[in-house]
Amino acid sequence: MNTTEYITHSADETIALGRELAAKLHDLRMVILHGDLGAGKTTLVKGIAEGIEAASQDDVTSPTFTLIHEYRGPDVTLYHVDLYRIDTERELATLGLDELCASEGSLVVIEWGEKFPRLLAECDAEIRIERVGEMERKVTVVKGR
């Protein structure tokens, strides 16, 4: 297992970190994002989307109500998933995450995936975002199982 920690001091730095991480994540299938409400999960995804040339940061929004946003890049399609409002395995199954993860050239980034132990067991990496100050965030990336 490979663990790397970063500290960001602003939303712009978190987006820049996402762009940097995109190169390390684009070959993965599923990444779980951990963090409290407002920690910066979607902010990080803005950078990841830019890094894989799938969307500009202004086009990336939280999928809290739509559950899944799709951003198509030249090599990778990013599926940004929010499970905050999903409570049961049955509801989870209706989203078709297994199919998204199985499709070639897809990266599925899931907020609140830790609610489902099966997803934690299947993911390729976890990214934890913690507030350590007003604007500071500690971002911990754990790759490999």
Image (spheres, helix red, strand yellow):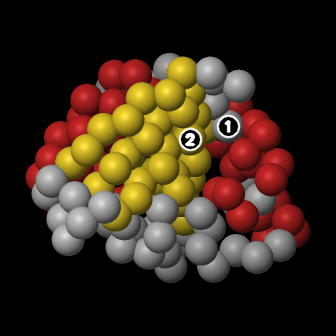
Q: Is residue 138 left or right of residue 105?
A: left
Callout 2: helix, strand or loop? strand
Residue drawn at x 48%, y 50% is: 128
| Residue at 65%, 57% in the rendered image | 113
Compute the Cα span from label 1 to label 2.
Answer: 7 Å
Does the rendering let one see residue 103?
A: no
Question: Residue 115's mark?
Answer: none
Nearer to me, 34 or 106: 34
Mark 1 vs 2: CB contact within 8 A = yes
Q: Considering depth in this image, is 37 or 87 the residue closer to the camera?
A: 37
Image quadrant holding the C terminus, namely top right
Image coordinates for residue 88, horizontal then vertical, percent: 83, 73
Identify the element where label 1 is drawn.
Answer: loop
State left or right for residue 22 relative to residue 51. right
Disc 2 marks which amino acid? Glu
Q: Does residue 22 lie above or below 36 as drawn?
A: above
| Marking on residue 123 | 1
Q: Tell me which amino acid carries mark 1.
A: Cys
Q: Is residue 42 visible?
A: yes
Is 49 located above or below residue 105 in the figure?
A: below
Say if 132 sits above or below 14 in the image: below
Q: Quadrant of residue 16?
A: top left
Instruction: Point out which mark residue 126 bears.
Output: 2
User: Where residue 136 appears, x then y in whole percent?
Assistant: 22, 58
